[in-house]
Amino acid sequence: MLVADLVGDAPTAAIVAALRDDIADLRARLDIAEAMADSLPHRRRYLNLGYTLVRRLLDVHVEWVDQVERELQAKEE
C-alpha cells in the first residue's frame, strides 16, 4: 500500500487481491490443524481458542482486501 501512489491503483489492487489465495491456503491449513486437535484431547480446548483467533484475523484480512478493492475501483470510475 505504501507504493500505491507510485505504481497506481490497478497494480495495487492486483497485488492485494492476490492475498485471497494466501488466505485460502491458510484457511485450508487451519482446517487440517483443527482436525488434528482432536487427537490431542488434553490440548484441544486451548488449540481451538487459538484457531478461533486466527480465523477471525483471516476474516479481518478479507474485509480489508474487499475495502481496498472497493476504494480503488471507486477512484477508477
Image: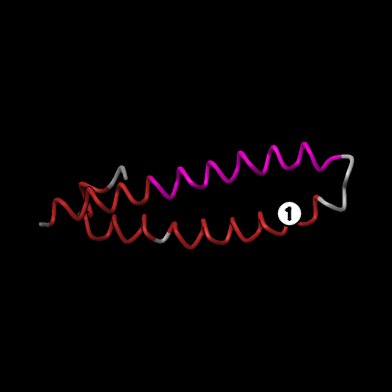
Camera-nearest residue between 48 and 24: 48
- In the rendered image of this protein, does residue 30 appear above or below residue 51? below
Task: Identify residue type, mark 1.
Answer: Ala
Q: Which residues are magenta?
A: 43-63
- Looking at the rendering, which quadrant does residue 45 occupy? top right
Residue 56 placement (x, y as % from top left): 54, 42
- In the rendered image of this protein, does residue 25 appear above or below residue 70? below
Q: Is residue 29 left or right of residue 21?
A: right
**Identity of the residue drawn at 16% across and 52% down:** 74
Q: Quadrant of the C terminus?
A: bottom left
**Identity of the residue drawn at 36% across and 58% down:** 15
Q: Which residue is mark 1?
A: 33
Q: Main secondary structure of the magenta part?
A: helix
**Identity of the residue drawn at 31% across and 47% down:** 67
Q: Quadrant of the N terminus?
A: top left
Identify the secondary structure beneath mark 1.
helix
Q: Any magenta on residue 52?
A: yes
User: How many discs mark residues in the rendered view?
Assistant: 1
Camera-nearest residue between 26 and 12: 26
**Identity of the residue drawn at 53% across and 41% down:** 57
Residue 29 placement (x, y as % from top left): 66, 58
